[in-house]
């Protein structure tokens, strides 16, 4: 059952009709207070929540839901006709929402999102039920261990089967993520293609129309990049076996990929001899790709980027560790002469979807440095940054060898 919350009945009825056409049952509430009362009495799989409501608004309702173990996992899609600013969208995600859609609502997009989050919610509940079952089985095994050896063996076998089911479910979730990615990217590709055809064939003589078409194409490109980056971020949770890797080769591949941007901006890049370490090479490649790519992107206007990559062995897992030829860790720094940032935001830059610069000026999804931090932490390492506005930035990594 899906709950639609909106203070205007004329907004609720079309949404219920759209859901009904796709075989989805729905209920409604015309205020935040009524929604909370209904949620206390009935279980809902998804909530479509209007943001602007008299009394308790949508953000307050979701914050109340997040405080309860019974309701905190219900996915909430926010709908808003006027709160389209970035700060409201950010507030929607911070309060516990899973998505934020602006009105007027595209029925096809809404149904795609609703079905996606319903499926994810159902799979989450299935996994939770299996985990609860496993916990109960473990307790039973502990209580019966001394006198019921035969039952223990039976339960152990059952646990193994449940574990295999969990692994299969996890694999299916990964496959589902890729399917969702394809289903989201395909319409974006079509949008971009048809809009370009419209621009080239019919509106080349209308500057205003061309401007809006270009904005549409750029928006589709940003959405495609966001989907790709989110998949990269989610894939970091999977287990990959690290191997002995020459980081110089990894860095060389990254510089080859960035050759066009380096040459276009007249950038200068110098690098010390990097160590050989036991790492996941594809993930370290993403680290260098993001750090060097950011240095190129955030270069000062009309000032060629200068990037220095230094490496030294140190004796401990600390940013202030002493240099040691026999150290079991390496300290890698990536320093540039770019626009920099206020050091007060040092913790913010590694948080997913956080960006310190205007998206209109600097393209990006706000995921790159979050990926870097997650990779370094998966390698049992540390990462920090130091910067001043107009004085460039320095990223420091401590990595076990």
Image: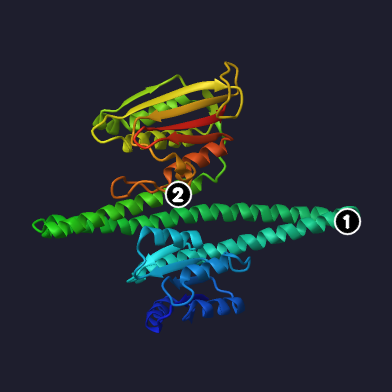
Where residue 252 appears, as percent x and y from the top left, is 39, 26
Where residue 2 appears, as percent x and y from the top left, is 50, 75
How packed is label 2: few (under 14 Cα within 10 Å), some, or many (20 or more)?
A: some
Where residue 306 appears, as percent x and y from the top left, is 33, 27
Which residue is pictured at 55% across the width and 52% down the height? 171
Up-down: is 282 above or below 191? above
Image quarter (top left, top right, bottom left or bottom right) of the C terminus: top right
Up-down: is 181 above or below 401? below
Q: Residue furthest left?
A: 205
Up-down: is 3 above or below 205? below
Q: Which mark is residue 148?
A: 1
Relative depth, front residue between 140 and 381: 381
Residue 294 falls left or right of residue 215: right
Mark 2: secondary structure: helix
Residue 325 falls left or right of residue 363: right
Distance between mark 2 and mark 1 Cα atoms: 46 Å
Instruction: Name the residue tied to disc 2.
Output: 231
Q: Residue furthest top?
A: 325
Which residue is pictured at 52% across the width and 26% down the height? 331
Question: Would you say the residues marked 2 and 1 are in contact, meaning their CB atoms lie under 8 Å apart?
Answer: no
The answer to whether residue 149 is seen in the rendering is yes
Where residue 334 appears, as percent x and y from the top left, is 43, 29
Relative depth, front residue between 269 and 235: 269
How packed is label 1: few (under 14 Cα within 10 Å), some, or many (20 or more)?
A: few
Q: Residue furthest right?
A: 147
Disc on the earlier residue, 2 or 1: 1
């Amino acid at each position: 059952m899906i709950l639609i919350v909106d203070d205007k009945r004329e907004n609720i009825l079309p949404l219920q009709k759209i859901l009904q056409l796709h075989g989805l049952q729905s209920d409604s509430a015309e205020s935040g207070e009524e929604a909370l009362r209904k949620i206390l009495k009935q279980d809902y799989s998804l909530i479509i929540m209007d943001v602007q409501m008299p009394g308790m608004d949508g953000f307050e309702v979701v914050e109340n839901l997040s405080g309860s173990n019974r309701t905190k996992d219900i996915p909430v899609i926010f709908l808003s006709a006027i709160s389209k600013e970035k700060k409201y969208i950010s507030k929607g995600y911070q309060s516990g929402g899973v998505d934020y859609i602006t009105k007027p609502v595209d029925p096809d997009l809404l149904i795609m999102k609703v079905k996606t989050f319903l499926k994810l919610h159902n799979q989450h509940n299935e996994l939770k039920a299996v985990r609860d079952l496993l916990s109960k089985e473990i307790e039973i095994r502990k209580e019966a261990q001394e006198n019921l050896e035969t039952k223990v063996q039976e339960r152990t076998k059952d646990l193994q089967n449940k574990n295999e089911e969990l692994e299969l479910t996890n694999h299916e979730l990964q496959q589902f993520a890729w399917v969702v990615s394809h289903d989201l990217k395909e319409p974006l590709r079509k949008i971009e293609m048809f809009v370009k055809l419209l621009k080239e064939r019919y509106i080349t003589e209308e500057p205003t129309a061309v401007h809006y078409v270009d904005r549409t194409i750029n928006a589709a490109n940003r959405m495609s990049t966001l989907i790709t980056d989110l998949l990269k971020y989610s894939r970091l949770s999977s287990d990959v076996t690290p191997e002995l890797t020459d980081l110089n080769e990894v860095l060389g591949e990254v510089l080859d990929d960035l050759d066009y941007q380096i040459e276009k901006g007249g950038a200068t890049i110098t690098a010390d001899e990097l160590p050989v370490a036991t790492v996941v090479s594809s993930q370290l490649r993403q680290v260098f790709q993001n750090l060097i790519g950011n240095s190129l992107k955030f270069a000062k206007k009309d000032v060629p980027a200068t990037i220095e990559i230094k490496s030294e062995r140190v004796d401990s897992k600390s940013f202030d560790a002493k240099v040691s030829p026999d150290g079991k860790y390496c300290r890698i720094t990536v320093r540039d002469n770019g626009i920099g940032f206020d050091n007060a935001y040092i913790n913010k830059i590694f948080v997913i979807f956080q960006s310190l610069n205007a998206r209109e000026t600097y393209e990006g999804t706000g995921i790159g440095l979050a990926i870097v931090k997650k990779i370094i932490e998966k390698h049992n390492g540390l990462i920090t940054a130091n910067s001043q506005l107009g004085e460039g930035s320095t990223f420091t990594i401590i990595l076990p060898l």
